[in-house]
């Protein structure tokens, strides 16, 4: 009887805990560009889990910078995202990008109060570069930029208007967005 009561008490306690939820807020590409203090294209050279004592588990990716669109980076930068694996403990953070050595991406980064670079909006701040199978050129999935790469309204999977962009088209779009922000903000600051 005591064991049954303990099980019932545990079940009631588990039901009283508020369930967690993940809310995704759509963000326009212009906002990602404005928030980033550093925008670079680079390839990942190393990926490691970082777990300081008493701190949260994070993954640190070392990126060899190939081009800078905003800010002045060093030749190599470290980018951190939540989650990773330490021993048998695996921490998964929803919408946190995973990195693989050798992959190339455009990174939209901002450092926090701890001076560590992190992607804006987690996966919103990482645009992976791949080879377009139709053209053989490096390409990137277009960002959501209403009026530039997307029409107002819902995003439709497979929309023919949202084709892959070459890396140079993508970087030109970033420069156009930065230039328009510089023109519309006081003293050239977003």
Image: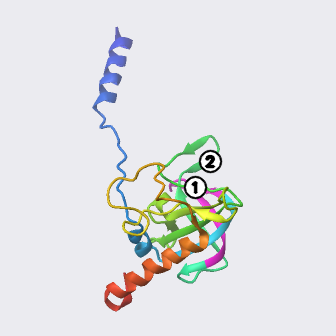
- Quadrant assignment, res 148: bottom left
* Lower sequence index among marks 2 and 1: 1
Residue at image position (32%, 85%) is 185
Mark-to-mark CA distance, 2 and 1: 7 Å
Which quarter of the rendering shows the C terminus?
A: bottom left
User: As drawn, which residue projects farthest toward the top?
Assistant: 1
Mark 2, residues whose alpha carbon is within 10 Å: few (<14), some, or many (≥20)? Answer: some
Looking at the image, is 20 positioned above or below residue 33? above
Q: Which residue position holds label 1?
A: 51
Near-viewer residue (103 or 12) = 103
Which quarter of the rendering shows the N terminus?
A: top left
Residue at image position (66%, 57%) is 134
The dot on residue 86 is 2
Determine the main secondary structure of the stretch shown in magenta.
strand
Left or right: 156 as drawn, with respect to 65:
left
The answer to whether the residue labelled 2 contacts the one labelled 1, judged by CB atoms less than 8 Å apart, is: yes
Based on the picture, tell me whether residue 82 belongs to the magenta stretch: no
Near-viewer residue (171 or 57) = 171
Q: Which residues are magenta?
A: 48-67
Residue at image position (36%, 57%) is 26
Query: Residue 27 in the image: x percent, y percent?
Result: 37, 62
Looking at the image, is 188 positioned above or below residue 118? below
Query: Residue 24 in the image: x percent, y percent?
Result: 37, 52
Query: Residue 65 in the image: x percent, y percent?
Result: 65, 74
Looking at the image, is 40 positioned above or below residue 137? below
Mark 2 element type: strand
Mark 1 element type: loop
């Amino acid at each position: 009887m005591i064991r049954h009561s303990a099980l019932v008490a545990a079940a009631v306690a588990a039901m009283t805990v508020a369930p967690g939820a993940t809310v995704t807020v759509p963000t326009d590409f212009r906002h990602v560009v404005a928030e980033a203090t550093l925008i670079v294209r680079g390839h990942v050279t190393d990926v490691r889990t970082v777990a300081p004592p008493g701190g949260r588990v994070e993954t640190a990716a070392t990126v060899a910078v190939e081009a800078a669109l905003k800010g002045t980076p060093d030749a190599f930068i470290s980018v951190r995202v939540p989650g990773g694996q330490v021993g048998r403990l695996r921490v998964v953070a929803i919408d946190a990008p995973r990195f693989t050595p050798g992959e190339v991406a455009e990174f939209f980064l901002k450092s926090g109060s701890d001076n560590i670079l992190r992607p804006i909006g987690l996966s919103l701040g990482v645009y992976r570069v791949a080879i377009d199978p139709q053209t053989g050129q490096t390409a990137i999935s277009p960002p959501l930029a209403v009026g530039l790469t997307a029409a107002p309204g819902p995003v439709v999977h497979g929309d023919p208007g949202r084709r892959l962009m070459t890396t140079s088209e993508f970087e030109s779009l970033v420069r156009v967005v930065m230039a328009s922000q510089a023109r519309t903000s006081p003293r050239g600051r977003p």
